[in-house]
Amino acid sequence: MKQYIGLIHKDADSDFGVSFPDFPGVVTAGSDLDDARAMAEEALAFHIDGLVEDGEAIAEPSSLEDVMADANNRDGVAILVAVKTKAKKVVRVNVTLPEDVLSQIDAFAEAHGYTRSGFIAKAAQRLMELDAA
């Protein structure tokens, strides 16, 4: 089971906030330390499941030394947060497509909030489900 570093932040009159240097933008909070840890596990699992669903690669956990080398991270207290997800392994493949089809895929994916990989994965799953019915 992988573990990622979460940084706990606490300002006066605030909850305990948790951020993840390996996943910028993923933040959560809890009313106490136990709640913050539980919320961190939930937020991390939710984010990683979303990356897998979109066909995105999942970053390897950074070392404590690498995280603390960034001066912006030094005001937080580091904790280890276990990944509690049933995320499937993502495999990188090389696919050959006509240029016009790739352009259409990219335009559609961007307009609908998908990555290229996420769109292709969803489209393939949908076609297989329709074919099986």
Image (cartoon, rainbow, N blue to C red):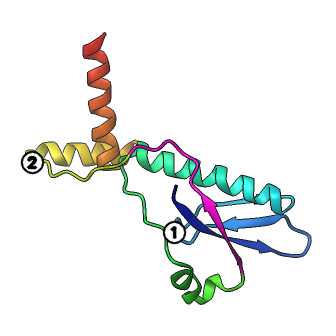
Residue annotated with mark 2: 96
Question: Who is closer to the viewer here, 111 or 96?
Answer: 96
Amino acid carrying mark 1 in the image: Asp
Residue lying at 81% horizontally and 58% vertically, measured from the top left: 34
Question: Who is closer to the viewer here, 17 or 113?
Answer: 17
Residue lying at 86% horizontally and 67% vertically, measured from the top left: 14
Q: Earlier in the sequence, mark 1 or mark 2?
A: 1
Is 82 rendered above or below residue 104?
A: below
Residue lying at 34% horizontally and 49% vertically, measured from the top left: 90
Provide residue 3's location: percent of width, then percent of height: 56, 62
Provide residue 66's location: percent of width, then percent of height: 51, 83
The quarter of the picture where the C terminus appears is: top left
Q: Is residue 77 magenta?
A: yes
Find residue 68 and report its image quarter: bottom right
Q: Residue 105 vs residue 98: left or right? A: right
Residue annotated with mark 1: 22
| Image: magenta residue range | 76-88
Query: Is residue 113 among the parts visible in the rendering?
Result: no
Find residue 105 and report its image quarter: top left
| SS category of the residue bearing label 2 | loop
Is 82 rendered above or below residue 76?
A: above
Q: Nearer the viewer, mark 1 or mark 2?
A: 1
Q: Residue 77 vs residue 113: left or right? A: right
Residue lying at 37% horizontally and 56% vertically, measured from the top left: 57
C-alpha span from label 1 to label 2: 31 Å
| SS category of the residue bearing label 1 | loop
Provide residue 15's location: percent of width, then percent of height: 84, 64
